[in-house]
Amino acid sequence: MKFTAFHLMPFDGLSEDFPQKHRSVWVDVPPELMDVKRMHVLYNDYLDELEFAARSGFHAIGVNEHHSSGYGTMSSPNMMATSLARRTADTAAKLLVMGDVVPLYNPPIRIAEELAMLDVISGGRLITGFPLGSSQDSNFAYGIPPATTREQHREGFDLILKAWQSQEVFTHNGDYSKLRYVNPWPKPLQQPHPPIWIPGSGSIETMDFALERDFPFFFLSYFGADYAENMLKKFWERAEMAGRDDNPYRVGMFQIVLCADTDEEAREMFAPHVDYFYKRTAHIYPGFIEAPGYKTVNSLREVLPPPGAVSAKRPDSFGAAQKYTWDEFVDKGIIIAGGPDTVRERLESAAKTSRIGNWISLVHVGDMPREKTMYSIDRLATKVLPALDGVFAEYDNPWWPQPIPGFEPTAVAPVDWEARR
Amino acid sequence: MTRHEFEGPMDGVTFVVDESGRPDGPVLVWLHGTWGQVDDLPIGGAADDARVLSLHLPGWGESDGVESFKTLPDLALGCWWALDQLDAHDVTLVGHGIGALLGIELAAQQPDRVRAVVAAAPFGMVDERDPGADFFALLPPDLMPHLYADPQGDLPARHFPPPVDAHDKGLSAIRRVVVLGAASRFLFPLPDTGVKRRLYRLAGTPVDLVFGAQDGLIPAATRDLWSAAMPDAEITVVEDAAHMLPYESDAVARIVEQRVAAAAAPA
């Protein structure tokens, strides 16, 4: 299995009464709550944490893209990834950019250019993800009409792929962008293109999009692999219908993973930060979560309860999670946390149940301070990941950066990492 | 009532038009509002005196192919195509919300075919100092006070019946996605469609603009923009009404009756 250490880079200064006082942490979060001096410290701590994960043995480190949000402050994942590329040049860790949100870049060749630069700078270590973007980001923060978000995503995605691969200058006459000359310089180092992972939050269109194009599907959920079981079962059914094989590297799972020396220590160390995450950074006005038209009617019909069904709050919802205790978070599998044996067993069990080859592990949650994050990353890297190395070892992973024949990365000035620790 | 269904004007587009009233009466075209009310036309006695053509806009449920229309003027051309199929000329255009805006766009395109326009709570302009409530974001309980002057009254319950079970709740959510998803193609993120640049085409066309004083979606600042852009329009502000004013008040129906009566009168 492959593990990516992933970060949201949240703001840690939301007060306990934030949910009572304010409508949402996203879109219209009050500007006056941001402390930019604190943010200076946080950005640098967060980058350190990802660099540490790269040095400790995680297979990849990952960044993402969000806007107008205290939940995640990386409005430019490419900027973060470029810094990480240089400072992890002496590691084998790959770089996952689980932005760029295609509809937000017009023309989308900006993405083709920046990611190509990143792939070249990093020596071919880039993995890309092309999310549709959350409704909060794409629709409410950036004003993309919800009903055209998917159309824009598809058009932009195809343009980026063609721009990376074409050996000729070409013309793009799309509905959403028009370019007489498409000619990004340089192309990516990895040819025909860096690995592409498709993230989705459960719409069947996104699963089918990944399957049609033979890319892995990543399920983005904050409620863990157990609740994702039915969704992933549906993915594998659709994969079979599409004639795809059962390679577990076709599936990735987003998962909060926290590790201490014992289960009890994990509770003591991390419980307040999990609480902060679900109560404060996940306090989003429900109307911002899915603008009308963002999800298709077909996807909504898939989850329509039968006639006569009683309305009930879903257990895998942020609303329900507001009241969960640490034990409930752990027992329900919403988070995987504890001592190394517990974490390893839970990961292995979920991986085998749903055939999950890739884990995007959220190694920092809520207002977790740097030292606790480093502590957890260290336990994961030294006591959990090595024990899971053999799982799915019999499968090739064609969606992972491969050695580039005839290419030797250049020397990059080393980082005095011990001083940074 | 007679239902007409037409395929076109482009592949994948269908137009459904319900016809009722007096076949030889003046033509009244009803363009429904953003939430797609078509069952209960708020046009008073004009329902009997006019040849009423109620257009189901593509994407709102009965008609299909909204994705083929990239702009509201595109959609207006499609509506004219549907009206061509019904040989509808010398029309009085009556609309609500997005339908009111569409009526103005139709008139801008073919003013010679339009007898009058009655626009109730039209979208189309925005004052950034007060853009109005974000009806794409607000969930129904939060939206109601912006739509109705009396959000606890019978009318909201009739338009948005409380769901009886989870299935019903899911269907309501789907209906919201259908109608607002279609509207989002033209009105998101701000309902300023640039109609102001085309209003000169309505010079000489009688236009009534009717607003609800308590409309949370179209605040006073927006009404002022309309007044400034259409100085010759008849402007009525209904005090005890909000965005759903055609249903909250009979003011729109009275204006429509007058316009239809004028259209029926000998030249």
Image: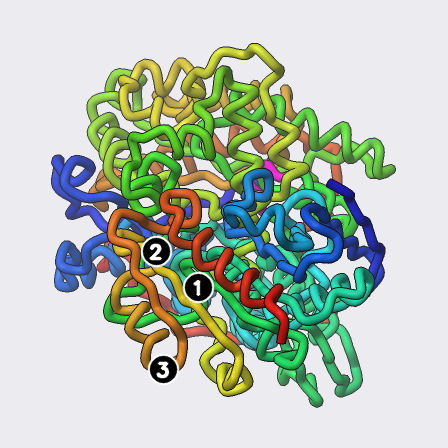
Q: Nearer the viewer, residue B52 or A142?
A: B52
Q: Nearer the viewer, residue A386 or B131?
A: B131
Tell me the CA gap for discs 3 and 2: 22 Å
Magenta highlight on residue A103: no
- Residue, disc 3: B231
* Count of marks placed on residues: 3
Q: Is residue A216 above or below residue A170?
A: above
Classify mark 3: residues with Cα within 10 Å, few (<14), some (14-19) or many (20+): few
- Marks 1, 2 in one chain: yes
Tell me the CA gap for discs 3 and 1: 17 Å
- Marks 3, 1 in one chain: yes
Counting from the top left corner in percent of width and height, residue A264 is at 26, 16
The three-letter code of the residue at mark 2 reads Leu
Magenta segment main secondary structure: loop
- Residue, disc 2: B217
- Pointer 3 chain: B
- Give me the residue at 43% from left, 43% from top: B247
**Left or right, residue A61 beside residue A366:** right
> Magenta stretch?
A199-203
Residue positioned most to the right = A243
Q: Is residue A254 visible?
A: yes
Q: Quadrant of the N terminus of chain A?
A: top right
> Mark 1 near mark 2, Cβ–Cβ under 8 Å?
yes
- Give me the residue at 15% from left, 47% from top: A13
- Marks 3, 2 in one chain: yes
Q: Is residue A189 above or below residue A39?
A: below
Tell me the CA gap for discs 1 and 2: 9 Å
Q: Is residue A191 visible?
A: no
3 or 2: tag closer to the N-terminus: 2
Classify mark 1: residues with Cα within 10 Å, few (<14), some (14-19) or many (20+): many
1 or 2: tag closer to the N-terminus: 1
